[in-house]
Image (cartoon, helix red, strand yellow):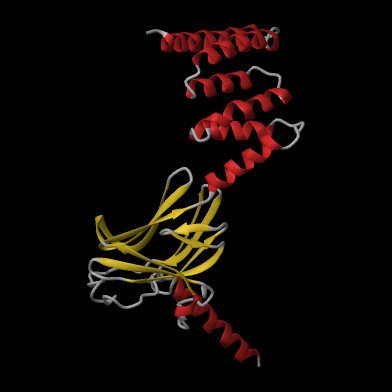
Amino acid sequence: MKAVTLLFSLFLWAGTQLSAQFTPFSPPAHLEQVVGNTKVIIDYDRPASRGRKIFGGLVPWNERWQTGASGTRINFSRAVSFGGQAVPAGTYGLLVVPGPKEWTLLLNTNGDEFGFVEYDETKNIAEVKVPAAKAGRFYDAFSIDLDISPENARMYLSWTDVQVSVPIETRTEELAMAYIDSLLAAPLVKISDPYFQAARYLLFTRRGDEKAPDIIHQLQRVDKGYYPYRMLMEAYVHLGQQVQALQTIEQGIEVTKREFAARPERLLSILKYWEEERGKVEAMLRP
């Protein structure tokens, strides 16, 4: 019995050692990216072309392909728009039907069926047609990439000299603006962070500029420092309200003097900032 166990252990060890000598033909890949307020996770594998004709050869034209050697899963933590089609949060299988000039991209709710052997057309939740294009470089291995903007993304599928892409849009702006409206409508909360983050979002994205002064006024009620005045001045400049911006600068200077009375170097630095900003705003008022 001991001899059998020893022999089995030797075979197991030998198999482990042998497999360690070879790399997988289609290495697994994991892509995780935050897009706006949504996390996108893509798990796939990357077969190499190895000199073979891929599209119109190994991958026939106008036939469904599981996208990679074993299939591709994509997960959205929140609802998104995939190529203009609404897709709820969840995990999906990504399949494609490649053509010489146009591809069809499919998201199928049977995402747990690795390889999608049991493909069911009725479980497709999105079907998007996209043009095929020449890739900017040669991709020996099948690749999936996400190019992100502040709130949205474009997903690229590339192999050899072929590339297709599809937009992925989140509801970040819609949800953010709804949250800001709720902050303005609700009673004042005694912490500054919700107002600060909302004001920062409005100033950075330049969306809802008209709401920025209101949210910053709320911030000023709980944060008595100089920085909310700096944000308010910026909001008025965005709105083209230079007179109000100058008034805010004067108020900010007084608050700065009180806040940093015991820190003269910091005080001088911020007062210099205010003088520079005053010069810029006054220049806007000149004919």
Q: Quadrant of residue 85?
A: bottom left
Percent across and percent down for residue 44 are 44, 66
Farthest bottom residue in view: 1
Looking at the picture, does residue 161 appear above or below residue 253? Answer: below
Q: In which quarter of the image is residue 101?
A: bottom left
Image side of residue 138 versus residue 249, left or right: left
Looking at the picture, does residue 191 appear above or below residue 119? Answer: above
Percent across and percent down for residue 146 are 41, 53
Image quarter where the N terminus lies is bottom right
Image quarter where the C terminus lies is top left
Percent across and percent down for residue 234 are 52, 22
Q: Which of 98 and 287 is in front in this view?
A: 287
The residue lying at 66 percent from left, 24 percent from top is 217
> Total of numbered circles in the picture?
0
Q: Which of 170 and 26 is in front in this view?
A: 170
Q: Which of 60 and 226 is in front in this view?
A: 226
Image side of residue 250 versus residue 142, left or right: right
Percent across and percent down for residue 193 are 68, 33
Image side of residue 195 versus residue 244, left or right: right
The residue lying at 51 percent from left, 32 percent from top is 204
Looking at the picture, does residue 224 appear above or below residue 178? Answer: above
The residue lying at 55 percent from left, 46 percent from top is 174
